[in-house]
Amino acid sequence: MNRTKYLLTADDVKDYLECSRDHAYKVIKKLNLELASMGYEVEAGKVPRKFFAEKFYGFEAS
């Protein structure tokens, strides 16, 4: 069964943005702060695929 992951890790973000792992963690932290301010529960070091897709032009959540 080939399932798409719901949460992206720093390594996933690093690959999509072609940046360092350290920068990927900073991006995730920023997105998670935004989600938390909207009242959502977040998991450190991971970000929902759909929210990431809304914030970054050209990324498609499948």
Image: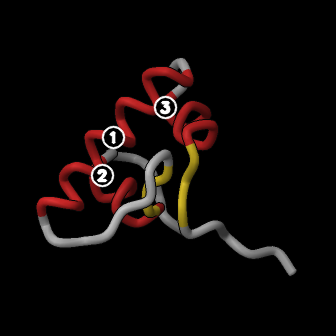
Q: Sequence-wise, which precedes: disc 2 or disc 3?
A: 3
Colouring rule applied to residues: secondary structure
Of 23 and 2, the residue lying toward us: 23
From this view, report whether residue 35 is shown above or below residue 22: below
As measured in the structure, the alpha-carbon distance from the residue carrying label 2 to the one carrying label 3 is 17 Å
The amino acid at mark 2 is Asn
Question: Which callout, 3 or 1, points to the residue nearer the camera?
Answer: 1
The amino acid at mark 1 is Lys
From this view, report whether residue 25 is shown above or below residue 58: above
Residue found at x 49% / y 45%:
45
Secondary-structure class at tag 3: helix
As measured in the structure, the alpha-carbon distance from the residue carrying label 3 to the one carrying label 1 is 15 Å
Q: Which percent across, then down, holds residue 33?
A: 22, 49
Residue under pointer 3: 17
Name the image quarter holding residue 50.
Answer: bottom left
- Give the mark count: 3
Secondary-structure class at tag 2: helix
Secondary-structure class at tag 1: helix
Name the image quarter holding residue 37.
Answer: bottom left
From this view, report whether residue 17 is shown above or below residue 48: above
Residue under pointer 1: 29
Residue found at x 36% / y 30%:
26
As measured in the structure, the alpha-carbon distance from the residue carrying label 1 to the one carrying label 2 is 5 Å
How many residues crowd around disc 3 within 10 Å: few (fewer than 14), some, or many (20 or more)? some
Residue found at x 55% / y 39%:
10
Dots 1 and 2: beta carbons under 8 Å?
A: yes
Question: Which callout, 2 or 3, points to the residue nearer the camera?
Answer: 2
How many residues crowd around disc 2 within 10 Å: few (fewer than 14), some, or many (20 or more)? many
Q: Which percent across, then down, holds residue 35?
A: 23, 60
* Number of the label disc, if any, that sits on residue 32: 2
Of 1 and 25, the residue lying toward us: 25
